[in-house]
Amino acid sequence: MKAAFFTLGCKVNQYETQIMEQAFQKAGFEIVDPESEADVYVVNSCTVTGVGDKKSRQMLRHFRRKNPNAVIALTGCYPQAFPEEAAALMEADVITGSADRSQLLPAVLDAIDGKRVVHVTPHGDDETFEPMQAEGMLDRTRAFVKIEDGCDNSCSYCIIPKARGHVRSKPLKDLERELESLVSKGYNEVVLSGINLPFYGRDLGVGLVDAVELACEIMPRVRLSSLEPELLSRSDVERLAKLDSFCPQFHLSLQSGCDRTLAAMRRRYNTDMYRKVVENIREFFPEGSLTTDVIVGFPGETEEDFEESCRFIEEMGFAKVHIFPYSRRTGTDAAEMPNQVPNAVKTERCSKMAERAEAVRQKFLGEQVGKTESVLIESEIKNGMMQGYTKNYTPVVLPAVKSLLCTVQEVVITGVSGDSCIGRIKNPPVGYDPMGMF
């Protein structure tokens, strides 16, 4: 039988989809593309915004039209946060949540036999990290490994604590085994991921940097996914700076550069605290990069607040800013706040901020020209070119040579083209043909 998986949301969701695919493969299923004909379709949902819920419902209907006789399953954060709403979606034959992925396969097998299964396990206070080990994801250069789940914060706009439960962490021994397996399969880089990654280890008596130090003993290159700035201490940054394998790209979640808005969001820092963290990073990682997320149009955000946020982004000099209009999320305090910003205003502000953020990004890319950086070459792109990333996650485009894929090369950055830098191999291998095509 054939099974197809469609994933919405974050890298953690993508990692968990891989775990579920592995379980189905071991049970004898052939995993196919979600646009192919399949006997089973699984939608791994995201519920960060109401738009995510809408997309999940759309995909259920899409797969039902595609194959009326297929078994269709909805799993992940949406049914976990809103189990009654999800259970009412009759397009789905199986409804499970994010608390216990091992129950998905048995539920699908029951549905193949004609039984509709709705089973969402509530998160509990005594819940521990669900054992799971990836065998490799997406390509043979970079792997994502989930080491933390859950969030104990209470940001006013966020439903994730309800969808993911309290903080729990992958034991270091389990992480070691997983990383050794990935290295043996040829992976050169790992991204340590989590729902609120800096909380890693609080339930185990260790910390995030302990996990990074372990990973750097095993993997050639180690990255971190999104970080909460107030949880990254100066001593943590100093320890990270001693690790040769650590890639100095810090995705520091900001959400707003306005202190009044940050307080309304119930974030646990202000711009002065954020600025201090950035100063620490730049002291120990002068060649590092900073990226971030920003929400525009939060309830009560005035033009003055928005302008303050834009100025802070420019001051921080981010390599890249991911900008999102505030999305009213049912079940959160922010959804009931007064002075909701009209959609047209949010759209206009997103456009204005994007223009200013792009100017900052172009400045960052220009500052990379002339440097020699190690680049992990990942993929072929159009026009006979290939692309890779430096340790600080600067995209670099090079002439395509098949033998260099999945390798780390020293590259001289010679210029900027659009959203990427361009470069040349510093010491080409014997037989290197920069015009070689795939």
Image (tube, rainbow, N blue to C red):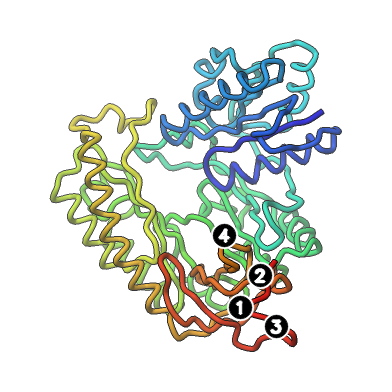
Q: Is residue 246 left or right of residue 326?
A: right
Residue that badge 1 annotates: 244
In the figure, is residue 257 to the left or right of 228? left
Q: Which residue is mark 4?
A: 208
Q: CA distance from mark 2 to mark 3?
A: 31 Å
Label 1 sits on a secondary structure element that is loop
Mark with earlier residue (2, 3): 2
Q: Nearer the viewer, mark 2 or mark 4?
A: 2
Measured as percent of width and height from the top left, residue 376 is found at 62, 71
Distance between the alpha carbons at the discs numbered 3 and 4: 41 Å
Q: Which residue is mark 2?
A: 216
- Dot 2, crowdedness within 10 Å: few (<14), some or many (≥20)? many
Q: Earlier in the sequence, mark 2 or mark 4?
A: 4
Which of disc 4 and disc 3 is earlier in sequence?
4
Q: Is residue 7 visible?
A: yes
Q: Secondary structure at mark 3?
A: loop
Using the rendered view, name the quadrant where residue 348 is placed.
top left
Q: Give the spatial CA distance, label 2 vs label 4.
A: 12 Å
**Could you tell me which quadrant the N terminus lies in?**
top right
